[in-house]
């Protein structure tokens, strides 16, 4: 397969995917080559279309388990007899790993699926696979997340299994030993691909002594020193109802969802002892970390300070980012460096909204002979954007994209469930999906250009790999 | 305890019709949200390229975003963006597909634009040169910056024995740099015809609406002359080849074996037994090989078996493994061989029932996302699978006799061209060879 590059979701971590689903957008840089009459002809095609906008309510409600006290956002959808559940334990991600236990959150995420209750060996996986129940866990930078996908028919059984995994994991010696070896091997494999090497080194350069600098998989010595005691300690301290957010979507009504919450999360402690991770203090001073390696292409990553998802500047910044580098082929950077010069297959920017260090990240790759020119054009475009901002026309087109693409987020039921969790994490409210287009419409040119000037500053932190 | 949906139910509830010019249309209703995935599949990929013109199908795919008479320059991309449409495309050996995810109110626009570029593409010299540079960069990014991609490319080259299926979809660097607008135009004129394409509309619409829109927007292009598929069907010798590859950045060894086997396009009756064989042997962490090789023998850190039957010629059956630290490749290979044979001896009616159960239990999720449904149906129709068969995958899986699975394994091992590949770190100075 030779998929064309659409950049922005390449190096992106889990939360960004969710945020992108919340506010996915794109815009182009207008050139004046296009005859006005032709433009109108295509526009008329939309206006005269027999298929009009369909009002789509996307009603979200809140439900709670009576006994567990766990609440969730719910979107009922009866299109298929399927239920998807997404959950998130706040602040239980890998950045909170104890200093000598780097990798414990990730290892827990893997081992929770290995055996629980009386199901030893492969028995638990057999039970799940036979019913088509899919349960998985993951440790991101900030949070520990999980998901469950099941048919309506197996919903109750699925909830029982999930509860068993969360409350009675077996953490058997032989499973731990195997997962340790698999993780150490994964650390080796990271070093094979220049993009992964660069991402790891970029994090170290950016975050220094902050826990965000650590390898997402942990440290070899710590992985090998982990045991069932440490894993249980991680579970008791972190997987607690006091920091749990849940999204439920699919063929399930609110009464069923309430009962299900009790079933899934019964027996979890309300309180634990979650590690506090301090905000990262990054000095964006223009430094460049260079890794010399014989690669097919030179690759670079760059970042400046961004804003939290909950920040008042988020929406104008999101739109500004799209105009510069978020829109795919029609972004300013893609137009200048890819479409007009052919210097790269992909150049992109995106907002990374991690809790302790929100960033605007940019990246591109180019062969050694063309890299310097691509870099020069990147710096030119970035600076011009920071100085001059966007035009009224660019802003209008960006809004058009964001408004017209609003419903695309509902394609997958699993995306919907993840979005419901993210809406809680970022305090967007039950009516976010109804209000979101109004937030977009209300943006002014002045606001967008104020944040463009404030955040797209010339002093970045960069890392690059290749031959320079 | 078999948990399957009833045998009358269809997997996608799709409907199909054919326009006068031969364009096949498949409609997959899904009413969750007012959105549609449009996919236009041309049943031609890199395999249909003229000799020495490797990469022309893929470069053409890129140029399809560079304008027609009615949409000069970046107009197509800009219309997509301002209408909130997610637009992309891909090229493979046998197909080239263009696709958009969009709000239902934008469907007519997207249909008009897709139909327009089926026959009205204009390639100017400057765009051509730029896009050739871009696909060159794409190859560098995808292959040269990824040791595993280089390994896979080399194995396929050997397995396919000089046939067009063994060429990289992107073309080689040399081929890319030597392509001319004439090469790409020739491919375009020959292959972008309605009677070699499948249009899939998946989402918030029904067949009646889809038919009137398809006739309105896709009815104009004339049918073209279809070249016989026989021309590219490779005659492969029953080889046993080995590739020992060493690359500087590789940190841990890999073992990979490829077999050229039956596919939907070539002896489709073998497809379902082979699917069951792959799932039974190496489909996930409850499979036979994983349990034996990883959990019991501890010779490997991972092992998996995959089978891709979506081809107009041979399908590819593959077994891959990562040896545990300190386990020599030869030792892994022997253990794998022993585990394979042991698993074959254990293959019984009950075991295959269990494998079927796992395959059937997940089928229903395929119709959740209109994007997935469009992809699966488009890929299978392009490979020649009748719609009725796509709809009754569950029955097809149920019908397989366990003896047929055993026979598929035996036939593959004796008759299929096969390549074993070993990827290892580069030998350092002082290492004994």
Image (cartoon, coloured by chain):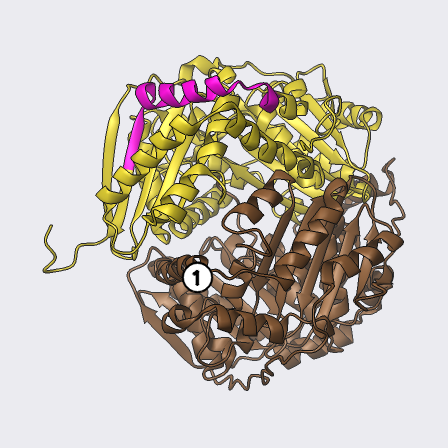
Decide: is A405 above or below B90. Answer: below
Q: Is A302 positioned to the left or the right of A313 in the image?
A: left
Name the residue rendered at 25%, 27% in the picture. Answer: B240
Give, as a single range, the part of the protein colored magenta. B396-420
Q: Is residue A266 left or right of residue B185?
A: right
Query: Please, is residue B379 above or below residue B79 in the view?
Result: above
Q: Which residue is mark 1?
A: A173
Q: Main secondary structure of the magenta part?
A: helix
Residue B32 visible in the displayed image: yes
Q: Colour of chain B?
A: yellow
Q: Quadrant of residue B224?
A: top right
Q: Secondary structure at mark 1?
A: helix
**Residue drawn 34% across the image and 59% down it:** A369
Q: Chain of mark 1?
A: A
Q: Give neighbour class at mark 1: few <14, some 14-19, many 20+ (Cα, 10 Å).
A: few
In reply to whether residue A225 is colored magenta, the answer given is no
Q: Nearer the viewer, residue B8 or B228?
A: B8
Position of A148 relative to A291 (above/below): above
Which of B399/A230 is in front? A230
Q: Between A145 and A66, which is closer to the camera in this rendering?
A: A66
Q: Position of residue A177 (x, y in %)?
A: 40, 60
Residue B361 percent across, percent down from the top left: 64, 36
Quarter containing the N terminus of chain B:
top right
The image quadrant of residue A343 is: bottom left
For chain A, give the colour: brown
């Amino acid at each position: 397969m030779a998929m064309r590059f659409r950049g922005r979701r390449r190096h992106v971590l889990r939360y960004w995917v969710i945020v992108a689903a919340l506010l996915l957008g794109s815009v182009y840089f207008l050139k004046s080559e296009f005859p006005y009459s032709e433009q109108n002809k295509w526009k008329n095609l939309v206006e005269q279309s027999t298929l009009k906008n369909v009002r789509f309510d996307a009603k979200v409600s809140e439900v709670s388990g009576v006994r567990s006290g766990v609440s969730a956002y719910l979107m009922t959808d009866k299109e298929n007899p399927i239920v998807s559940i997404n959950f998130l334990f706040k602040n239980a991600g890998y950045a909170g790993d104890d200093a000598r236990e780097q990798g414990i959150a990730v290892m827990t995420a893997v081992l929770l699926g290995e055996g629980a209750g009386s199901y030893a060996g492969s028995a638990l996986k057999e039970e799940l696979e036979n019913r088509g129940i899919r349960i998985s866990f993951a440790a991101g930078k900030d949070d520990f997340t999980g998901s469950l996908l099941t048919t309506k028919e197996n919903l109750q059984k699925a909830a029982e299994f999930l509860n068993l995994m969360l409350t009675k994991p077996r953490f058997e010696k032989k499973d731990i030993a195997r997962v340790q070896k698999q993780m150490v091997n994964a650390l080796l494999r990271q070093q094979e691909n220049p993009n992964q090497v660069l991402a790891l080194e970029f994090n170290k350069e950016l975050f220094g002594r902050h826990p965000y600098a650590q390898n997402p998989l942990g440290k070899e010595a710590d992985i090998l020193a982990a045991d069932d005691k440490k894993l249980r300690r991680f579970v008791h301290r972190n997987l607690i109802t006091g920091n749990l957010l849940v999204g439920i979507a699919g063929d399930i009504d609110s009464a069923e969802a309430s009962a299900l919450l009790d079933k899934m999360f019964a027996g979890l402690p309300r309180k634990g002892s979650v590690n506090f991770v301090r905000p990262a203090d990054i000095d964006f001073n223009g430094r460049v970390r260079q890794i010399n390696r014989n690669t097919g292409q030179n690759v670079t990553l760059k970042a400046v300070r961004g804003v939290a998802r909950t920040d008042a500047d988020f929406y104008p910044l999101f739109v500004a980012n799209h105009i510069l580098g978020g829109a795919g082929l029609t972004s300013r950077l893609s137009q200048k460096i890819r479409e007009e010069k052919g210097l790269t297959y992909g150049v992109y920017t995106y907002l990374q909204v991690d809790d302790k260090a929100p960033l605007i990240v940019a990246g591109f790759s180019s062969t050694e002979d063309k890299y310097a020119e691509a870099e020069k054009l990147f710096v030119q475009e970035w600076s011009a954007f920071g100085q001059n901002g966007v035009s009224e026309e660019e802003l209008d087109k960006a809004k058009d994209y964001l408004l017209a693409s609003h419903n695309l987020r509902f394609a997958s039921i699993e995306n919907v469930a993840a979005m419901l969790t993210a809406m809680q994490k970022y305090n967007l409210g039950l009516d976010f999906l109804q209000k979101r287009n109004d937030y977009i419409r209300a943006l002014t040119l002045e606001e967008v250009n104020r944040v463009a000037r404030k955040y797209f500053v010339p002093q970045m932190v960069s890392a690059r790999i290749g031959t320079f | 305890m078999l948990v399957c949906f009833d045998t009358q139910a269809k997997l996608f509830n799709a409907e199909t019709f054919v326009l006068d010019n031969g364009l096949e249309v498949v409609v997959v209703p899904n009413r969750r949200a007012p959105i549609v995935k449009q996919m236009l599949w041309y049943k031609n990929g890199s395999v249909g390229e003229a000799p020495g013109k490797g990469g022309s199908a893929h470069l053409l795919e890129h140029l399809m975003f560079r304008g027609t008479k009615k949409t000069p320059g970046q107009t197509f991309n800009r219309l997509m963006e301002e209408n909130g449409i997610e637009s992309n495309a891909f090229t493979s050996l046998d197909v080239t597909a263009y696709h958009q995810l969009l709000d239902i109110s934008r469907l007519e626009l997207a249909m008009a634009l897709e139909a327009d570029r089926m026959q009205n593409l204009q390639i100017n010299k400057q765009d051509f040169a730029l896009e050739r540079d871009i696909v060159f960069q794409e190859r560098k990014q995808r292959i040269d910056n990824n040791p595993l991609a280089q390994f896979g490319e080399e194995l396929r080259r050997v397995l396919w024995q000089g046939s067009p299926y063994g060429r990289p979809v992107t073309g080689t660097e040399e081929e890319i740099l030597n392509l001319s607008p004439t090469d790409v135009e020739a491919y375009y004129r020959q292959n972008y015809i309605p009677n070699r394409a499948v249009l899939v509309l998946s989402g918030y619409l029904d067949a009646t609406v889809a038919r009137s829109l398809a006739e309105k927007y896709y009815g104009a292009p004339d049918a073209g002359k279809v070249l016989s598929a026989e021309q590219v069907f490779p005659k492969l010798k029953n080889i046993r080849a080995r590739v020992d590859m060493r690359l500087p950045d590789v940190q841990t060894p890999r073992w990979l074996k490829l077999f050229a086997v039956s596919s939907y396009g070539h002896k489709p009756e073998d497809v379902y037994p082979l699917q069951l064989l792959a799932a039974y042997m190496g489909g996930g962490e409850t499979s036979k090989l994983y349990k034996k090789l990883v959990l019991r023998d501890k010779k490997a850190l991972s092992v998996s078996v995959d089978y891709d039957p979506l081809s107009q010629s041979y399908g590819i059956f593959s077994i891959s493994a990562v040896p545990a630290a300190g386990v020599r490749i030869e030792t892994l290979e022997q253990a794998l061989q022993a585990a394979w044979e042991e698993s074959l001896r254990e293959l019984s009616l009950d075991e295959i029932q269990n494998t079927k159960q796992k395959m059937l239990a997940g089928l229903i999720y395929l119709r959740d996302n209109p994007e997935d449904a469009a992809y699966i149906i488009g890929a299978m129709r392009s490979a020649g699978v009748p719609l009725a068969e796509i709809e009754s995958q569950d029955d097809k899986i149920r019908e397989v006799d366990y003896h047929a699975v055993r026979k598929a394994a035996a036939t593959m091992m004796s008759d299929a061209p096969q390549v074993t590949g070993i990827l290892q770190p580069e030998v350092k100075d002082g290492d004994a060879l």
